[in-house]
Amino acid sequence: MQLYNTMRAEERAELIDQAGKQRLTLSFYAYAKIEDPKKFRDDLFLAWNPLDVLGRIYVAHEGINAQLSLPADYFYEFKDTIEQYDFMKGIRLNVAREQDDHSFLKLTIKVRHKIVADGLDDASFDATNKGIHLKAKEFNQLLEEPNTIVVDFRNHYESEIGHFKGAITPDVDTFRESLPIIEEQLKDFKEDKNLLMYCTGGIRCEKASAFFKHKGFKNVYQLEGGIIEYARQIEQEGLQSKFIGKNFVFDHRLGERITNDIVSQCHQCGEPCDNHTNCVNDGCHLLFIQCDECQEKMENCCSVECQEVIHLPLAEQVKLRRGIQKGNMIFKKGKSDALKFKHSGELSDVSLATVEKPKPIRERIKQKKVLVGKAEHYYTKAQVGLFLVENQELKTGDKILISGPTTGNQELVLETMFINGKENTTAKPGDKLTFAVPFRIRLSDKLFKIMSY
């Protein structure tokens, strides 16, 4: 009986691409009394694995916290699996505003002591005595009142790329660090101020609001469903967004845009940018903000030192890493002196630049991508990409997508192409295809044809 993921991420990505099915990224949480978390975990795996559910899920005696993706075709079957449990009947599923088929590439369900590491002794206070939940319109109204204090209960790397205007944004690496800091900072406002709190999907505020009420704060409110649900409601109801920038998310996307404002800078050159990357050096993996130009120049590295390391022989790189405790470094939160434009703590509400607002999800779902081939080489000086065509025909005028973990998703229209070294209008499986690409491609990149429904 298989109870664990057995496929490499690269293999899973290939299968997703070949399937060509629209996937949904969503999240949910529930506090509930679970007698046997291990059995609960195994039951979920057996129910979700056949539905091709992928994600990162934590279960504990106190409940479940899940971020995952699944084929859109299986949405209702998935819903049936969770509504078999009374505490998840009618549960709110926060569907991502920006969909990415590669948001998760493994199904990982772990049993934890808590579903969120808060460092609190739950027996010392009533965790069910929570703050008042507010919808987007109510949240906006309370923000306008002069006796309101709004607090971001996320970490520094989350709030840096987007936050509510005027919010207190603690310079912390973890949720548990923020609780005593905020309590000390607001100790003189327990009686007369509205304490308005928010986080990504609401789960951190569920516990924080009860903790602050226990500590004597009289007027405690929390954003229902967090930033994810807030974004859905303001779009649906035509409300003004008091949140500015991007909402950080804990999957391959690393963020989804709420407004077209850029409020942060590339940590290396200072240009307006809010795209996170992980240092490609396996001995580092620092999470930082990097623009396209610096990504090209620094080869996805956070520093010159890391850039030098990635060009060493693999055996020497492994030797350098030996004895270093890496842990879960994909979200390593440490700050580096090499990053001159990193900001945390007190953040500005000023927009440094704007980006074109992305199309609504319902428009993007009308498109289907079909895997055509893979990258073979990139001629830097000529800015020409070489691809091996494997599955489908391509013709001039076709809309294509080049996609990869570093390249992201880049759409182009084929205007002129060369087949096996000669200009032609049609490429067939087995052909070597070259055409102009105004950005660097990698060997991990895939070539897709975009089909309209």
Image (spheres, rainbow, N blue to C red):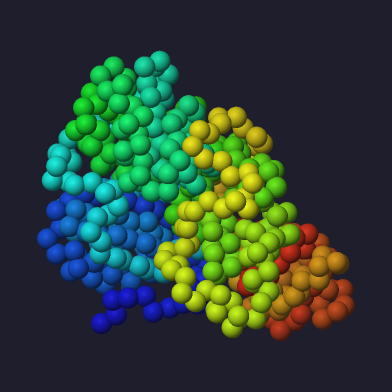
Can you tell which quarter of the image residue 399 is in? bottom right
Q: Is residue 427 visible?
A: no
Image quarter (top left, top right, bottom left or bottom right) of the N terminus: bottom left
Can you tell which quarter of the image residue 132 is in? top left
Q: Is residue 33 left or right of residue 453?
A: left
Of 307 and 130, the residue lying toward us: 307
Q: Is residue 177 left or right of residue 16?
A: left
Where's residue 325, x and y in %? 43, 68
Q: Is residue 285 left or right of residue 377?
A: left
Of 11 and 295, the residue lying toward us: 295
31, above or below 48, in the image = above
Q: Residue at x 73, y 54 (%)?
A: 293
Where's residue 212, x and y in %? 25, 33
Q: Residue at x 45, y 35 (%)?
A: 169
184, above or below 322, in the image = above
The number of numbered badges drawn on the structure is 0
Where's residue 435, x and y in %? 80, 68
292, above or below 184, in the image = below
Image quarter (top left, top right, bottom left or bottom right) of the C terminus: bottom right
Of 40 and 186, the residue lying toward us: 186
Of 180 and 360, the residue lying toward us: 180
Where's residue 57, x and y in %? 32, 61
Q: Is residue 286 visible?
A: yes
Q: Residue at x 60, y 80 (%)?
A: 316
Q: Residue at x 75, y 81 (%)?
A: 431
